[in-house]
Image (cartoon, rainbow, N blue to C red):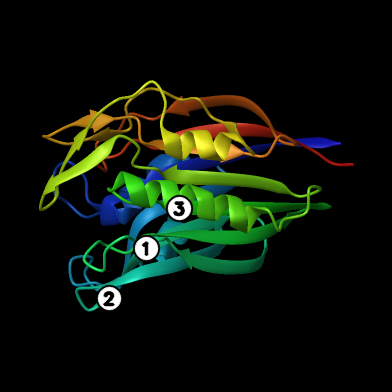
């Protein structure tokens, strides 16, 4: 037996669109059209002033119809918290939020949220991540991910998706440039163990730069069928949609 697993990764920019309006519902309704089983989210707010003191992952869950949800908070922000999340059609067996390695206490804390879901007889491990705007920290995070995933049984499936920030450099407050490279060390580390989505269309846009920084890695016991980048103005990132074949033994 097999099934097609539909997944989306999306940096939701705390619900803020290009028009400056914060509207999680319109983001959720856009993604719902693709009938995803899993959504990896980055830059979610919970109870922050800028997000009108709302629980954004609850709102996302409500309007996508994906009932199971977990959020991992990496920093306190404006009376609330900020981090990554996963929405799932399948019951969540386990969740843990890992804080990314940092090279300076002045750098923003990033992280990767790991959850485990049961899809029939198969265990599926999902990691939603938002890596640093500093290359050295991104490399350390990729190595940390290899260590974390080395403890997962080979019979289980793994998907790592999110905002990898490869090629991004911080040049000021909320200002970043992007430099494309033939290969990124962060990706090469993960390729030692995982398949890479291989997407190249830009997924992030700013006045100082834009590039393909949202992507996915997955274990070789999953087969990628298709993927597409979803153009939109509901965030400064485009969602990336993916389909995998899951075979049940």
Residue drawn at (41%, 63%), measured in percent from left and top?
57
> What is the crowding at mark 3: few (fewer than 14 residues within 10 Å), some, or many (at least 20)?
many
Q: Quadrant of the N terminus?
A: top right
Q: CA distance from mark 3 to mark 2?
A: 25 Å
> Residue 172 appears at what percent x and percent y?
9, 49
Quarter of the image where one finds residue 147: bottom right
Label 2 residue SS: strand
> Residue 243 appears at what percent x and percent y?
60, 32
The earlier-in-sequence mark between 3 and 2 is 2
Residue drawn at (85%, 41%), measured in percent from left and top?
248
Q: Which residue is mark 2?
A: 80
**Nearest-to-viewer mark from 3 and 2:** 3
Q: Is residue 106 left or right of residue 196?
A: left
Q: Which mark is residue 59?
A: none
Q: Which mark is residue 141?
A: 3
Quarter of the image where one finds residue 219: top right
Q: Quadrant of the C terminus?
A: top right
Q: Which mark is residue 83?
A: 1
The earlier-in-sequence mark between 1 and 3 is 1
Q: CA distance from mark 1 to mark 3?
A: 16 Å
Residue drawn at (65%, 68%), measured in percent from left and top?
94
């Amino acid at each position: 037996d097999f099934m097609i697993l539909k997944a989306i990764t999306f940096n939701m920019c705390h619900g803020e669109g290009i028009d400056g309006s914060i509207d999680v519902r319109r983001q959720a309704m856009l993604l719902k059209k693709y009938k995803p089983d899993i959504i990896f989210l980055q830059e979610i707010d919970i109870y922050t002033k800028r997000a009108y003191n709302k629980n954004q992952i609850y709102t996302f869950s409500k309007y996508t119809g994906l009932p199971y949800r977990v959020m991992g908070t990496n920093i306190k922000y404006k009376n609330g918290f900020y981090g990554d999340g996963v929405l799932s059609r399948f019951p969540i067996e386990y969740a843990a939020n890992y804080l990314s390695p940092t090279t300076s206490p002045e750098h923003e804390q990033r992280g990767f949220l790991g959850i485990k879901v049961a899809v029939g007889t198969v265990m599926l491990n999902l990691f939603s991540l938002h890596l640093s705007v500093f290359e050295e920290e991104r490399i350390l995070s990729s190595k940390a991910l290899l260590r974390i995933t080395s403890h997962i049984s080979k019979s289980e499936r793994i998907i790592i998706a999110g905002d990898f920030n490869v090629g991004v450099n911080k040049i000021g407050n909320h200002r970043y440039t992007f430099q494309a490279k033939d290969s990124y060390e962060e990706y090469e580390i993960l390729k030692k163990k995982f398949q890479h989505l291989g997407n190249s269309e830009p997924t992030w846009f700013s006045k100082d730069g834009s590039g393909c920084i949202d992507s996915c890695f997955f274990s070789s016991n999953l087969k990628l069928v298709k993927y597409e980048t979803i153009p939109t103005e509901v965030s400064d990132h485009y969602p990336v949609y993916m389909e995998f074949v899951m075979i049940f033994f």
